[in-house]
Amino acid sequence: MVESNSKQPDLDWSQVRETVRLLTVSVAQVEKGMKEGDASVNTLTDSFTSLVGQMNKINNVLESLSPSDEKEVAIGYCEETSQKIQSSIVAFQFYDKLQQSLSHVADSLKGLTKLVESPERLYNPKEWTDFQKEIRNRYTMESEKVMFDAILQGKSIDEAIQLAGKVDDDEDDDIELF
């Protein structure tokens, strides 16, 4: 027997089941994107780790040379390259933050799918409140909590993003350079 769906609805058709399917597609897309991104970032991380090692070796060779204008120019290039590597490492920290946010989105969508699938939970306000608390408690970044709270208070998406952005600006000052 074919399960009812929006293309072939019958008496068993359910908007809840359609919602669950769409939520599941969203989770799959987020998780697939995160896996693909991880592979690329791992390759970049390995490359930058190698670059740092090579830069240290070059700098050591340069330091052992007799003083000259060429030596100073080369040391300057090493310093400039090291600064670019540091900027790349900061970008990796932002990627890590993105990965963390997307992981929270995927987990929340999975939980929402389970909640919506269960008629006993779907129509129970306490279940929704508990689920909202569970989502908020998973957040590790203050900006996520601010955005979540703003949306639950009825603010628009743009307002919530703006509020979270203010917190992000404060948090960006705390990024560590290696």
Image (cartoon, grey):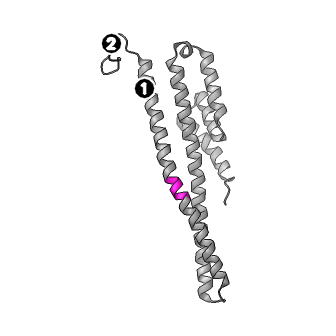
* Residue name at image x 61 percent, y 40 percent: 163
Was residue 44 drawn as part of the magenta stretch in this picture?
Answer: yes
Question: Does the rendering let one see residue 22?
Answer: yes
Tag 1 and tag 2, C-beta contact below 8 Å = no
Q: How far from the left and from the top, in percent, is residue 158? A: 53, 38
Residue type at numbered disc 2: Asp
Disc marking residue 46: none
The residue carrying mark 1 is: 21
Mark 1 residue element: helix
Please tell me which residue lies in front, 99 or 61.
61
Q: Secondary structure at mark 2?
A: loop
- Magenta range is 40-45
Check disc 2 and report the residue beneath it: 10
* Label whose residue precedes the other's in the sequence (1 or 2): 2
Spatial CA distance of label 1 from label 2 is 17 Å
Under mark 1, the amino acid is Arg
Instruction: Kindly report the secondary structure that dominates the magenta region of the rendered protein.
Output: helix
Most extreme residue toward the front is 1
- The image shows residue 68, relative to residue 45, as above or below, that is below
The image quarter containing residue 87 is: bottom right
